[in-house]
Amino acid sequence: MREPKLIDYSLLTLLALIWASAFFNIKIATYSFGPVTIAFLRVFFGSIPVLLLCFYKEIKIEAFSKDWYWFAMIGFINLVAPFFLIAYGVKSVQSNLAAILMSSTSLSSVVLGHFYTKNEKFNLIRTTGVLIGFSGIVYLFSDNLLINENNFTSALLILLGATCYVIGGLLTLKISKKKNENVTSSILIWATIILLPLVSLIEQPWKTVPRLDSTISVIYLGLVSTGIAWLLRFRILINNGLIFQSQVSYLIPIFGTILSYIFLKELITTKVIISLIAVATGIYFVRKGTKFK
């Protein structure tokens, strides 16, 4: 690992912007596509740059090896379920709220990590961070102007999607000795296999004529927010390590809120700002507590 340089901070900021931009693009994609179709197109287009990289670096892809069931399980929990749940939820919830709700992954990972790993236990600082962060999420649900009886369930589904990411990450530890590119390409392949019959039976998108902006957004979600973002993440992990890369969690909800306002003119209430500050503060304490575990 090397000491972070200007290029490393620039790449980290770029990764945060790409992941944050996914939320308003999901919103635009829902204008023409159903949640299953969005999930399918994300994993399909997202697999292209990752598979090309594996081919270029001559990395063996083990999607159909003896460990295929791990790749299939992680593909479903880490890609299929959250992509569907988030797309379904964002249809009824502002995308800036989705960005804040999704930032709960950094908090829930601490809770689940305490019970299911040996070296991710609670300490005072991390516990404080979790309590502050989740209080921000709870406070966000009190904003009746943005979350009400009509979209309350949708907001909960986005939180469930965030939890799926955390569970998928824990399962990935079971095959952590394999190359990142191999694991990512393999789970993308299995996610595509799982979603293909579902999208064919449930939504049949070829029967609709999508809007141009929705088409551009869904391609962007796959190629950039899924495929290229994962490759960027690989580079940052290799050069600077997990702790440096995890700082992206501070920036995603902030950038997501700003981008949603710029591109969709979504409402930013006082409660949204307070929740955003609480979540960012909670994540800060969680990361700080990681150094003292």
Image (tube, rainbow, N blue to C red):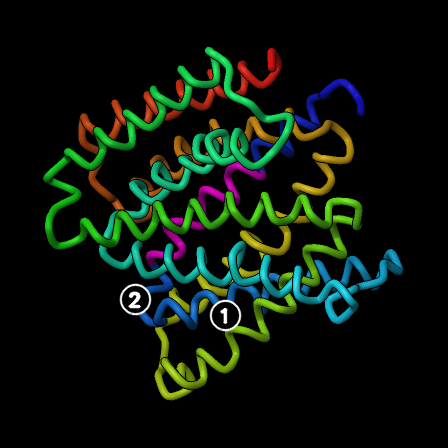
Q: Quadrant of residue 99?
A: top left
Q: Is residue 190 placed above or below 269 in the rendered structure?
A: below
Query: Is residue 58 depicted above or below 138 in this figure?
Result: below
Residue 31 marker: 2
- Residue 235 left/right relative to 75: right
**Total marks in image:** 2
Q: Residue at x 37, y 49 (%)?
A: 160
Residue 232 covered by magenta stretch: no
Classify mark 2: residues with Cα within 10 Å, few (<14), some (14-19) or many (20+): some
Residue 86 in the image: x percent, y percent? 37, 55
The prevailing secondary structure element of the residues shown in magenta is helix
Mark in front: 2 vs 1: 1
Query: In the picture shown, does residue 206 fall above or below 115?
Result: below
Q: Amino acid at mark 2?
A: Tyr
**Which portion, as a residue range, is magenta?**
15-27
Residue 224 vs 190, above or below: the answer is: above
Q: Residue furthest right?
A: 58
Residue at image x 18%, y 31%?
269
**In the image, 97: left or right of 70?**
left
Mark 2 vs mark 1, CA separation in Å: 16 Å
Say which amino acid is labelled 1.
Answer: Phe
- Picture quadrant where residue 15 is located: top right
Q: Quadrant of the C terminus?
A: top right
Residue at 24 percent across and 50 percent down: it is 93
The residue that label 1 is drawn on is: 40
How far from the left and from the top, in percent, is residue 87?
Answer: 36, 59
Horizontal side of 58 relative to 132 (left or right) equals right
